[in-house]
Amino acid sequence: MALRTVSGDGDTATPSETSARLRPAQRILSAADAIERMTAKREGKRGCYAMFSSYLGGVVTDPALMTVPLDDHMVHRGHGVFDTCSLVNGRLYRLGIHIDRLLASATGARLEVPWSRDELIQMVADTAASSGARNGIVRYWLTAGPGGFSFMPAECEEPCFYCVVLDPMSFGSGGFDPMRDGFRETTVRDTPMKPPLLAQIKSNNYLLNVLTHLEAADGGGTFGIIVDDDGYIAEACVLNVCSISRAGVLVTPPFEGILHGTTMRRLLDLARSTLVPEGLLTGVEQRRLRADESRTGVELIMSGGDTHVFPVVEWDGAPIGDGKVGPVATRLHELIEAETAAGSGSPDDFIDISYPR
């Protein structure tokens, strides 16, 4: 249906007068109008300090300009992968390990990557430096790029790399402290698990993760604990899970079919190198873990996001152990906190940022 540009009394209206009377979906905004409205929408929102776009060839620090082309196949086809690292005291924590996983995901997704590992690391470091932030979350994507709305990547003009620096993520509200209070979680039964391929590729499609969280929230949980049809624990919606048995053995499921968690891998290293010698643990195992075995253990711990160690004190209404945050979770959290504060380790553990003067 064609739009009329004649006023009710028969007079011809100017384009601006016509636009003012049109419904929102019909109004044509100028670039200045769009930026003004986007700026107003973004005001007071959770901080996003900087964004690098290879498509633009630079960094923007105005949240109103932090955009991705709608025809990027990451947006409308999910053909993109991502990863995240932490910015702690002006240092990027374990960025190299995360970039390795990003590249492995890109290979699994059959994405073209025209940048080397070192170039990707440098782009992330430069974006973090441009943000001026000393602490935060740094997330980055490799995508098939823009070019059209079909399902065929051949139409994409160029692969793209995007990177953003965000405020640190907080899971506490109303005085809740994860390490003091612990989480109360529920079993996720109705939301299907990801197929193994998608579970091991950090793709841009996190619909099942979101539905896992929503099912958990319906039952009073936050992340949910996925249990497969055979009664074995898989993972939480965005976290890995481990259990401490009454014999003092830390057990976590194998990574086949679930996220290859970098945080859980670090916790396993710390458990073997520190907690076993200290006597807090008697052993560390990675094997299939039955849900009923975990329910009778003394601790249940979820981990992710580099620094998040989240104790579970209640599962489906029943306490884990004595229903309080346990010594293993407390010690692992202390070790991660001390490690990130000290900023010591291999070049892949910490990358210092050269902030602009």
Image: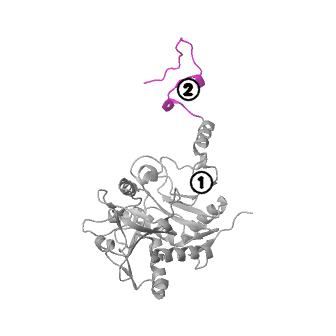
Give the position of the N terminus as an image quadrant: top left
Q: Is residue 183 above or below residue 65?
A: below
Helix, strand, or loop for circle 2?
helix
Position in image of residue 272 (x %, y %): 45, 84
Whether residue 316 sits left or right of residue 35 in the image: it is left
Q: Residue furthest bottom?
A: 277
The residue lying toward the viewer, choosing from 60 and 312, is 312
Q: Residues within 10 Å of mark 2 (few under 14, many from 20)?
A: some
The residue labelled by disc 1 is 47
Would you identify the image quadrant in which residue 236 lies? Answer: bottom left
Given this view, does label 2 or label 1 mark the residue nearer the observer?
Answer: 1
Q: Is residue 23 above or below residue 338?
A: above
The residue that appears at 32% across and 69% down in the rendered structure is: 233
Magenta-drawn segment: 1-29
Q: Is residue 171 magenta?
A: no
The residue that appears at 56% across and 62% down in the rendered structure is: 138
The disc label shown at residue 256, or none: none
Whether residue 56 sits left or right of residue 318 in the image: it is right
The disc label shown at residue 19, or none: 2
Position in image of residue 200 (x %, y %): 39, 67
